[in-house]
Structures are given as structure tokens and as C-alpha cells.
Image: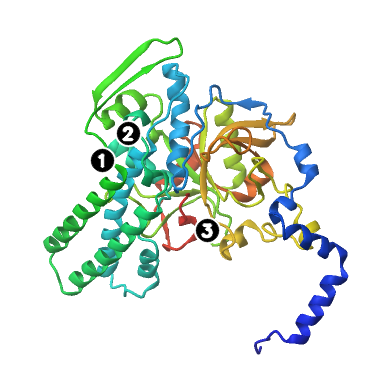
Amino acid sequence: MSSIPIVAETCAGWRDEFFKCPKNVLAQNICSRHDPFDVSLSRRALEDINHVFTHKVENEGKPVTNQKNSGRCWLFATLNTIRIPFMKHLNLDEFEFSPSFLFYWDKIERCNYFLNNIVDTARRGEDVNSRVVSFLLSDPTCDGGQWDMVANLINKYGLMPKKCFPESFSAEASGKMNGVLKSKLRQYAKELRDLVEASGSEKDVREKIQQQMREIYNVVGICLGIPPASFTWEYYDKTKAYHKVGPISSLDFYEQHVKPIFNVDDKVCLVTDPRPTNPYGQVYTVDCLGNVVGGRPVLYNNQPVELLIDLVTKTIRNGEPVWFGCEVAKRFAGAQGIEDLEVHDFNVVFGVDIQVTLSKADRLLYGESAMSHAMTFTGVSVDDTGVSTKFRVENSWGDDRGEKGYLVMSAAWFKEFVFEVVVDKSIVPPDVLKVFEMEPIVLPAWDPMGTLAQ
């Protein structure tokens, strides 16, 4: 078939048809002055949706957190999930773990992981123009991550209260720091590939990476600060009683004070990928995806979305929050904090529907969908027949959206745009847990299931 160019006569016909329709003119007049998505908000949907739930986690975390201009949602979602049982155990009114602490160590580890990937792909014979190396070089370090990646950081470095390692400018606005790191990492990538091509020894490669990482360490430390080797945490509980923890290392703080309440190794990540090429009941991983050399791999136990909904509901009814990853921006009314398939009526405004015109599987295949954000479930509504209908979500964008920072998500939206959840092993069926024992199928580095929550 020959290519079909656009000609003037065709455009003229489209123009005449457009202006013959009064609705198009009205929509144009309104959308030229207002956000098209706000214009498409359905009044009926807004009337039907509320932030009331039949089951809600006791003592939700305070204050509402804010990742600001950074892609740290996966860290915030993790820490928001952990702090709920931690605050309950210590009888605290307010508390935050330090996201900057984990962010610091992720930057250090992630840069080292990238450099090792560059060496590994060079030894595999991948040309610099190969798809996998081009993919690695397109974004040598970003802020986003996955559950297994944060578990690596916590198991290796522990946790720290925010008061003991507070935010910095580059933690809250990471773009300039990332720009410096990406520039240096691409320079280092060439140096390492040249060294491998010149048949450099294993010792030469290790020494080169160590030299490069010394410079990375300085850049990250200047931008984020360097976490102290030990700290002392003083606090008041709800009764105004004084308490003191420390001096203590961050790893000992996690092992002694957090792990007995929330052990990251007791949690497993289940995903739902309905593409025909990726059958359920199988475990997957993604080439070159991770953050800690020698750490646990990123594993995806693929299951039907209905199982994910069931396990999330059970967890919340047990009084526990749930970490999850989704594609946040689709069918999302940000100011109102509503994630619902009917919240926008695009047909009325544009004459066409968008965002859910393809199946979930086809959206993954055609680049229309991928996980983009991580948050925490803290509530659920169940109807008289036991079916979950909507969920309460703690976000990390401050308290000026939704209900003081919380969102409401319909179960229908969950089915379309949630991709993974993290639940306790104790409630997962034995046959599903057994899937983790299988040899993982390796997806290519650019597969949409390897997209990082930011």
C-alpha cells in the first residue's frame, strides 16, 4: 500500500465539517480557556463518588507526605506503608521515616549498578548501538524504582527517622543532580567499554569503577548530604512521655525497632500482566533491571487481577496497608482525588473516547500503558455480596489534592490501571507462592513491565 499524504482539499473538508457542528465550536471555546480534562469531568460521577469506606486501616500515617519535584514515590509509598504499624506500636501522633536516606543510598547503588551493567553488556558483545545498550544510555539513573529495589536498600542499609536525616534541595528537586550524574555516567560508560574492548583485566575494570564511584559519591554527598554512621532519635508519644533511641546505626534501627513490626522479607510482589505472551502462574524478571549489585532480583509473579484485588481487600480488612504500583494519570481527577473510569466524559467534549479504548494487554503492547506511580492502599469498600467496589489511597503529593492528600479508586479502575501489589506471604495461596520457585523468564530491558514508579 502506498503512503497517503494529507492534501489541502481534505483539510478543507475537515474544517467545514468541524465548524458545522455547534458542539465542536462550544468545546473549542471552552477548551481554549480551560484544562480540557477539567472540562471533561463528569458531574454525575462526582456526585456518585465519595471518600467513605466500609473498612479502613486504623491510625493512618500523619503528616501527609510530599515527594515534591522528584520521582521518589516508590520510596514514599514504602515508608508510608511501614510507618502505619510502626506509629501504632510506639503510640505516635506523627512520624516520618527519612526518604532522603533511602534516596541517597539508591543513588550510590544505582550508579554502581549501571556501571556494572555497562561492563556486562560489553562482555556480552553488545554494540554501543544495540538496543539494550542504547536503552541503558538513554537514562543511566532516574529516581524511580520497584518493590524489590527498596527491599534491597532496607535490608542493606536499614531505616532512619526523617528528623535525623532531613530533606535537601536536590532530594525535593532532583533534576539538576540527575543531570550531572547522567552526564558523568555516560562518560564513564565510554571509558569502561573502551577498557573492555582493549582486553582490560578484571582488576583494571574493578579499579576503574572504584575510581568512577569515588567521584559519584562526592557528587551525591554534596547534593543530598551523607547519612551519619549512627544517630540518636528523641521523641514524645501520644501521652507526652519522652523516649530516646540511640546512638544506633540505621541498620540496627531497622533490625531492632522496625523489622519485628514490618519485615520487608515477609512481603511478596504480585503483578498482573494480561498479555498473551506472558501467561499467569509464571515468574518474570527484566534484563538489566535492579539497583544493588549482588542484591535480590526484581521478580514478577504474574497473576489475574482478581486475585490482587482479593488479597488487597483481605490485607486491609486485617488492618494493614498495602504498597501498590499503577498508571496514575489515566482517568484521574487530580484536584478531587478520584480514579474512576467514568470520571471523565471525553465523548461529550471531543466526540471520541480516549485512554481505555484498547484492552489492558493491548495498551501494554502498543506503548499506551505502563506502571508510573506507587502509593499505599489504606481502605476498601465491600458491598453486601462481598465484592470490593472502591479503595482508599494514601498518596505522596501533599495534602492539597483529594481528601487531604488521599484518593478514592474504583475497583473498575483498579482492574485497568493497577499493575502490582505487595502483600504478606501469610495470606498468599501456597500455589501462588510456589511460582517464586520457578526459573524466571527474562523480559527485555525495555519491556513495559520494567517501567519504574516515579
| Visible residue check, residue 101 | yes
Residue 93 sits above or below residue 183 on the image: above
Q: Callout 3, which amino acid?
A: Asn
Which residue does the numbered mark 2 point to in the structure image?
165
Find residue 330 and report its horizontal and vertical position in percent: 63, 52
Which residue does the numbered mark 1 point to in the structure image?
226
Q: Count the numbered circles shown.
A: 3
Q: Secondary structure at mark 3?
A: loop
Q: Which residue occupies the foreground of this view, 166 or 143?
A: 166
Which scheme is used to colour this image of the protein?
rainbow
Residue 212 sits above or below residue 310 on the image: below
Residue at image coords 71%, 33%: 50
Residue at image coords 24%, 25%: 248
Q: Residue 206's quadrant in the figure?
A: bottom left
Q: Secondary structure at mark 1?
A: loop
Q: Is residue 116 left or right of residue 271?
A: left
Which residue does the numbered mark 3 point to in the structure image?
278
Q: Callout 1, which amino acid?
A: Ile
Q: Secondary structure at mark 2?
A: loop
**Quarter of the figure with the N terminus:** bottom right
Q: Which residue occupies the foreground of this view, 215 or 73?
A: 215
Q: Residue 275's quadrant in the figure?
A: bottom right
Residue found at the far front of this picture: 33
